[in-house]
Image (tube, helix red, strand yellow):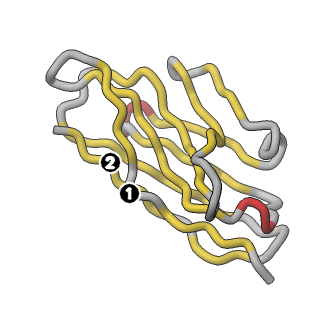
Amino acid sequence: QVQVVESGGGLVQPGGSLRLSCAASGSIFSIRSMGWYRQAPGKQRELVATIVGGADRNYADSVKGRFTISGDNAKNTVYLQMNTLKPEDTAVYYCNFVIRDDSLWFRDYWGQGTQVTVSS
């Protein structure tokens, strides 16, 4: 069993900053990737940023230069620092881990989602 818990999020004015955190715990043998996705009302879930293999970072074009993803392998935790937030960043943000668990297969694990609202 693996549990994934997110924290952070909330209401912020345009131009402001927020930091999201997400921790995985339980039967974790290894982590292939960590990442963040978001889903705005009426839209499909989209990739925001990922870390693959602990070092390879990828960002959606819409957040490059404003968002930074980082990970703490010792704590099985991934962070998303969001700066210069815009109203179009408003969405529910989900963290994702690809984890080799006690089945010895790699599986997707998702956080519960946290609302980020950018509005004046």
Residue 72 on image: x %, y %: 47, 36
User: Disc 1 designates what residue?
Assistant: 112
Q: Quadrant of residue 88?
A: bottom right
Q: Residue at x 84, y 42 (%)?
A: 65
Closer mark to the observer between disc 1 and disc 2:
1
Location of residue 82 in the rendering, given as x and y in whole percent from the top left corner: 70, 55
Callout 1 touching callout 2 (CB < 8 Å) = yes
12 vs 105: above or below? below
Where does label 2 land, which residue? Answer: 4
The amino acid sitting under disc 2 is Val
Q: Is residue 15 left or right of residue 43?
A: right
Q: Nearer the viewer, residue 110 or 52?
A: 110
Whether residue 36 is situated above or below residue 114 in the rendered picture: above
Task: Point out residue 38 in the picture as x, y percentages from the top left corner.
Answer: 59, 51
Look at the numbered disc 1 and give the secondary structure of its residue: loop
Q: Secondary structure at mark 2?
A: strand
**In this rendering, position of residue 73 left or right of residue 20:** left
Q: Residues within 10 Å of mark 1 (few under 14, many from 20)?
A: some
Q: Is residue 50 above or below residue 113?
A: above
Dot placed on the residue nearer the N-terminal end, 1 or 2:
2
For the residue pair 71 and 3, the one nearer the viewer reads as 3
The amino acid sitting under disc 1 is: Gln
Q: Is residue 68 above or below residue 107?
A: below
From the top left corner, tell me how far across and down residue 80 is, in percent.
Answer: 60, 49
Instruction: Pick the quarter of the image with the C terminus.
Output: bottom right
Q: Residue at x 22, y 40 (%)?
A: 2
Q: Residues within 10 Å of mark 2 (few under 14, many from 20)?
A: some
Number of the label disc, if any, that sits on residue 61 = none
